């Protein structure tokens, strides 16, 4: 059946078969490190330390996964991530779409400059700004607003830096998207006396849904995967989002390689789920603003 | 999320519609007319300045003001306690950095090696895979998913996964080649002659998929008629690629180059998870961070390293952005 289908598309040539063999081999090689991690995570530590890791399994069990998950209280760290990522994604999209609207709909002279500032800022390595940022976060007192009483060591601080950093990329993508919308659309509404806010909220934004969906997917994964900001800007291990917490947990709770494998894989589950469900959006978003570093 | 999914299906690919690889034909030819402005009321103008102003202030305050502060602090020493203790020291931090820091030049070298390896191995490999997968081949999506999978994982998870491969006692490689016994150890993570290469394999693992996706998007833009014409002229597959396809990929190549340079400058998470930037894997980003969360917290000195990183980054970013926006304007 498969040969019949292949024949319909292109005649089966030896070159094609070779190509498939190569690609399948390469794809398996690519998955090998992950499969190895899954294999290690599925085996009890006792068995692997006795027989070695490269050996035929006697027992395969999910015990490492349940142990890693409950012993280190991973739910708590997933919660931390949620508190940071959800507001960060929403606010970034809101802020950057406003800038994009301004830049793409009104030909003020600052447009190009504004867009340059945002995009260039987004391309900077994070370490360029971290020293003063760390000091700034320590200086800003927010008694009663954050648990730590400062911007440092708070979810709010992380949300702000994510928004500031990522909105550059999103503004760039969205402004280009909005430039594609027919100009008459907003012009007619303006002539009819609609306010600028209505133009943005009720006319422009709904048309940007596809781009917003792609960006939301991309942002969720990036912010979920962030390691550096939380490492430096959060001091209490308890307050860390899951990706950064992994580093501490691996010393404290994940005491053998099997548990480390299980813990790392559990951390990867949400992004993998998003990736498989929303692959189009993710890949689309990535190539859409291909200037992302 | 499912809702969003269906919307996209309905309205077609966002990547078709939106943005730019530089020089792409997607940019609208028509300039936005000035007429819009004249219709604005006072309130509208206020709304607009708030809409553009608030995000800009946040971005500038947290990104550009801090970048500027990095530059200023690089010429001072400061213990971080009260502004009064900031003392101007001129170029002292840089002098010490360039002449008296055993980690600085290795770090610069490792950043350069990082870039050279990424551009020489995973980038061409990603291009090669993209060209193969672009051949209207069966299971293309399955292969793509496999190659692209590492790109969605965080660098931290990638670090942990590869530690399971490299661990001298329990890792896959040493177990396979029998080097996991005392006396025969190959220490992929600790040996300063080996560890950078070991980490670069993990980094390349991820980078290949990223490059593949960028090139796949680029290849979609190559006019099939060009290829047919070339094939009719009797050109082989390699000749067609070299003379017809590759030249039209120029905009993608620019993006790939910029992305790869930035990636090499940003490299941090993977190394930090692996061995915290121990001997053999020092990077500029690691040195900066060590001056914040490490034992020796030297604000001015750390900022001087950050300035080196900033200068290199801007030397890449600014020409790229100017070229991009100029093309867009012309279009």
Image: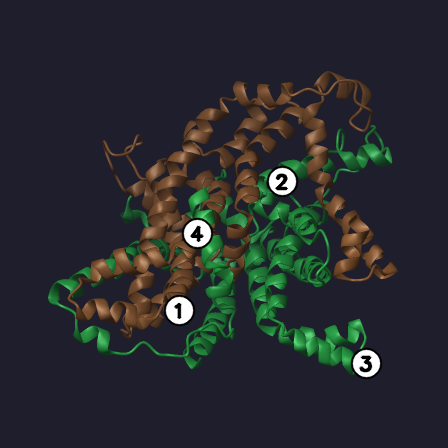
Do the residues at discs 3 and 1 belong to one chain? Answer: no
Q: Mark 4 lies on which chain?
A: B
Sooner in the amino-acid sequence: mark 4 or mark 2: 4
- What residue is pinned by disc 1? A180
User: Left of A122 or right of it: where is A185?
Assistant: left
Of mark 3 and mark 2, the one earlier in the sequence is: 2
**Front label number (2 vs 1):** 1
Q: Is mark 4 on a helix, strand or loop?
A: helix
Chain B drawn in what color?
Answer: green
Cα gap from disc 2 to disc 1, whole angstroms:
41 Å
Q: Which residue is at the far top?
A: A46
Instruction: Quickly name the residue at label 4.
Output: B7
> Do marks 2 and 1 share a chain?
no
Q: Mark 1 lies on which chain?
A: A
**Horizontal and vertical percent for residue A154?**
35, 36
Judging depth in this view, the residue of A271 and A263 nearest the camera is A271
Q: Mark 2 touching mark 1, by CB under 8 A?
A: no
Let me know if residue A164 appears in the view: yes
Q: Where is residue A111 in the image (x, y as percent from the top left)?
A: 32, 70
Q: Which chain is brown?
A: A
* Separation of marks 3 and 1 at Cα, in angstroms: 40 Å
Quarter-of-image position of residue B175: top right
Asked if marks 1 and 4 touch (Cβ < 8 Å), the reply is no
- Residue A106: which numbered mark, if any? none
Q: How far apart are marks 1 and 4 (CA)?
A: 18 Å
């Amino acid at each position: 059946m498969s040969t019949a289908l292949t024949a319909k598309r292109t005649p089966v040539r030896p070159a094609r078969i070779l190509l498939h063999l190569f690609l399948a081999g390469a794809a398996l090689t690519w998955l090998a490190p992950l499969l190895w991690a899954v294999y290690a995570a599925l085996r009890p530590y006792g068995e692997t330390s006795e027989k070695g890791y490269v050996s035929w399994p006697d027992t395969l069990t999910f015990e490492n996964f349940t142990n890693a998950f409950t012993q280190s209280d991973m739910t708590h760290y997933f919660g931390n991530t949620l508190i940071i990522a959800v507001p960060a994604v929403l606010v970034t999209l809101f802020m950057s779409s406003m800038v994009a609207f301004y830049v793409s709909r009104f030909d003020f002279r600052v447009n190009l400059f504004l867009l340059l500032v945002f995009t260039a800022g987004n391309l900077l390595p994070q370490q360029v700004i971290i020293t003063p940022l760390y000091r700034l976060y320590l200086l800003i007192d927010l008694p009663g607003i954050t648990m730590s009483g400062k911007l440092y060591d708070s979810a709010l601080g992380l949300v702000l830096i994510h928004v500031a950093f990522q909105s550059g990329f999103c503004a760039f993508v969205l402004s280009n998207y909005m430039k594609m919308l027919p100009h008459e659309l907003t012009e007619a509404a303006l002539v009819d006396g609609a306010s600028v806010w209505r133009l943005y909220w009720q006319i422009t934004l709904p048309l940007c849904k596809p781009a917003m969906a792609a960006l939301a997917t991309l942002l969720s994964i990036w912010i979920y995967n962030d390691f550096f900001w939380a490492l430096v800007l959060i001091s209490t291990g308890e307050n860390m989002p899951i990706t950064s917490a992994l580093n501490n947990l691996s010393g404290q709770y994940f005491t053998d390689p099997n548990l480390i494998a299980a813990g790392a894989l559990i951390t990867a589950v949400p992004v993998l789920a998003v990736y498989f469900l929303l692959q189009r959006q993710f890949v689309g978003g990535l190539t859409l603003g291909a200037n992302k570093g | 999320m499912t809702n969003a999914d269906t919307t996209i299906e309905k309205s077609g690919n966002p990547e078709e519609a939106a943005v730019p690889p530089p020089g792409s034909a997607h940019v609208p030819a028509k300039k936005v007319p000035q007429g819009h402005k004249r219709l604005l009321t006072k309130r509208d103008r206020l709304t607009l300045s708030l809409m553009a102003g608030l995000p800009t202030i946040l971005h500038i305050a947290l990104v550009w003001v801090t970048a500027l502060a990095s530059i200023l602090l690089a010429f001072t020493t400061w213990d971080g306690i009260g502004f009064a203790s900031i003392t101007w020291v001129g170029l002292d931090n840089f002098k010490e950095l360039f002449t008296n820091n055993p980690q600085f030049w290795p770090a610069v070298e490792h950043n350069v090696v990082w870039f050279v390896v990424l551009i020489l191995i995973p980038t061409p490999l990603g291009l090669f895979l993209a060209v193969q997968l672009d051949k209207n081949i069966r299971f293309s999506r399955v292969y793509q998913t496999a190659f692209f999978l590492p790109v969605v994982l965080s660098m931290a998870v990638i670090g942990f996964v590869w530690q399971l491969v490299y661990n001298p006692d329990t890792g896959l490689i040493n177990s396979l080649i029998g080097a996991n016994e005392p006396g025969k150890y190959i220490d992929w993570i600790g040996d300063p002659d080996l560890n950078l290469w070991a980490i670069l394999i993990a980094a390349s693992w991820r980078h290949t998929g990223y490059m593949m996706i960028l090139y796949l998007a680029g290849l979609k833009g190559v006019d099939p008629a060009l290829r047919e014409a070339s094939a009719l002229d009797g050109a082989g597959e390699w000749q067609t690629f070299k003379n017809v396809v590759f030249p039209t990929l120029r905009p993608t190549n620019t993006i790939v180059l910029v992305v790869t340079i930035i990636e090499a400058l940003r490299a941090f998470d993977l190394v930090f998870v692996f061995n915290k930037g121990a001997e053999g894997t020092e990077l500029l980003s690691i040195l900066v961070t060590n001056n914040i969360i490490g034992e020796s917290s030297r604000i001015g000195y750390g900022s001087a390293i950050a300035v080196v990183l900033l200068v290199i980054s801007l030397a890449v970013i600014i020409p790229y952005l100017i070229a991009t926006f100029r093309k867009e304007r012309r279009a």
